[in-house]
Image (spheres, rainbow, N blue to C red):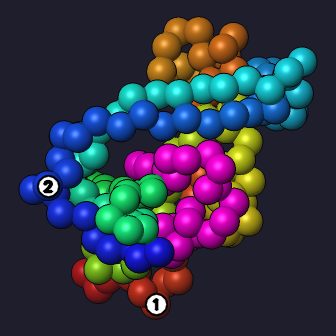
Amino acid sequence: MEIRRLEREIYAGRAFTARYRSNGYYDIGVSEDGFPIRYLPFAAPEERSFEDVFFSAWLEDPVAFGAFEGGELLGFAEGSPEGWNRRFRISNICVFDPSRRGGGIGQRLLDAIQSAPETAGARMLVPETQSRNEAAIAFYRKNGFSLIGFDLYAYSNSDPERHEVRFEMGKKLPPEKTETTA
């Protein structure tokens, strides 16, 4: 398997479908004391998918890396600096074939995309996932990310009922690589 940078001229605008399976979700309650979070299992595993495109127009200056085997794109990682707050947004990490997940492809893609923030002067890495994408949450936690925020209504007005709340994960980058002088 080879990891290489994807060329925007070739991949920009190409559609893909991301799929995942979930056994449960993280439920976010709302109370005067804050937002308690608890894991709740589904009665049976559920499948989810969404459509997206490479190098989306909303990304400031995107960079992407692909995992290739025999010329076939197995998965990719994509991200972009957020200049206004000096964070680097990881917009996607996706291994297309579910049978290939857990074999190190995602880890190699994350390792590749984590090299981009340093050159962008970012202070933090921020991937987004969903409260029901327990595999992604576990993957990010294993790699030093923690939950830094959520949006109850990022995708629709029924996100909490659909158990599809946007989770922001985050990891601070070492200060010596991210501090700039004014």
Residue 9 vs residue 137, the one in the foreground:
9
Residues rendered magenta in the picture: 89-113
Magenta run includes residue 62: no
What is the three-letter code of the residue carrying label 1? Answer: Glu
Q: Is residue 150 above or below residue 67?
A: above
Q: Is residue 13 above or below residue 68?
A: above
Residue at (25% x, 64% y) in the render: 6
Q: How many marks?
A: 2
C-alpha distance separating marks 1 and 2? 35 Å
Indicate which disc, 1 or 2, sits on the residue closer to the N terminus. Answer: 2
Residue at (18% x, 63% y) in the render: 7
Mark 1 or 2, closer to the camera: 2
Q: Do tag 1 and tag 2 residues touch (Cβ < 8 Å)?
A: no
**Residue 123 seen in render:** no
In x, y percent, where is residue 14?
23, 40
What is the three-letter code of the residue carrying label 2? Answer: Ile
Q: Which mark is residue 111?
A: none
Q: Which mark is residue 10?
A: 2
- Residue farthest left in this picture: 9
Which residue was labeled with disc 1?
176
Taking the image as shown, residue 50 lies to the left or right of residue 105, namely: left
The quadrant in which residue 102 appears is: bottom right
Instruction: Look at the image and tell me in which quarter the C terminus lies.
Output: bottom left
